[in-house]
Image: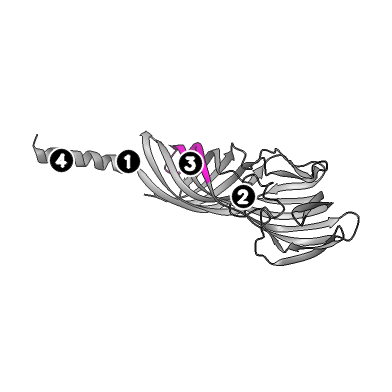
Amino acid sequence: MSYRFKIMALILILSGSLGAQSFGIRAGLNYTKFGGPLESNVNENFSLANGFHFGINYAYPIADQFSVRGEVVYTQIGTGYSYDGPSFYKIPLGNAFVYEKGNSTIEMKVSNAYVSIPLALSWQVSKKWEISAGAYVSFLVGPRGNGTLYFEKNTDSLFFKQSLIHNYNNDVAGGTATGTIGPSVWVDGKIVTLARDAGAYYNYLSTEKTGKLYNFMDVGLTGNVNYFINKGFYVGLKYSYGLLDVTNNEMDVLRKEYDETTNRAIPANHFDRNLGFEVSFGFRF
């Protein structure tokens, strides 16, 4: 066999192998929420929040109609959150906090940005339909939250509104989001000025803040269905079920009550997982 023939044969083999593989891109919207325990005898709820995702993928065939598919995806996963009921508020007074009992009404949207790496086994059922199932590992790169808090004390005229602008990775204990002065309240014979826009850890001393609210890594299971409009273009629906607690138990605390003996918040010890759907448009080539 001549040298040229060997080179040509190698090129044909490699070309055939590469031809069997596929690359692609997909993008779309997320509809996600946290799943986990809620406090009793209050109106607390997790609801669907929207976000977006964008990623690139690669598939390698392992058998007739079956392939292994991997992706790298930037995705926004979060939740809507609401609370209405008995609560408390930690009002900063010097180098400490005064705990005031009352009623809190909170409306928030949490949007946590991840870089996610799903790996799935895909079955090409027909020319039009494809089914996949697998797992993912995700790394948190941009956790944020925005909302509003209303607080009213039970026994007197103490009430105020505060904006919640949270950057869970970068905010510091006692920090504000904008530095803008907010409502003034009368506490223990003194006038205390609160921040208009509270950071994620505004109601924490540096000695109380033990890490960040959201954990860096998440792991879960996925399943999805794709419908091909033509050979390369498809629409897809994907469901994800988180297997890890996304919240740091030392920072995830009860809102309803606190430890009046130690004047400390009570850890919730709730297991909060990511749940949700992705609706995608994709192209494979």
The residue wearing badge 4 is 7
Looking at the image, is mark 1 or mark 3 earlier in the sequence?
1
Question: Are the residues at dot 4 and dot 1 in contact (C-beta closer than 8 Å)?
Answer: no
Magenta highlight on residue 169: no
Between the C-alphas of marks 2 and 1, the distance is 37 Å
Instruction: Identify the residue at horizontal 48%, vertical 39% (top origin).
Output: 131
Between the C-alphas of marks 4 and 3, the distance is 37 Å
Looking at the image, is mark 4 or mark 3 earlier in the sequence?
4
Q: Which of the two discs, 4 and 2, sits closer to the camera?
A: 2
Q: Is residue 238 left or right of residue 251?
A: left
Residue type at mark 4: give it. Answer: Ile
Say few, some or many: other residues with alpha carbon within 10 Å of mark 1 (under 14 / 14 to 19 / 20 or more): few
The residue wearing badge 1 is 20
Q: Is disc 1 placed on a helix, strand or loop? A: helix
Q: Is residue 60 left or right of residue 252?
A: left
Which region is colored magenta?
A: 119-139
Looking at the image, is mark 4 or mark 1 earlier in the sequence?
4
Between the C-alphas of marks 1 and 3, the distance is 21 Å
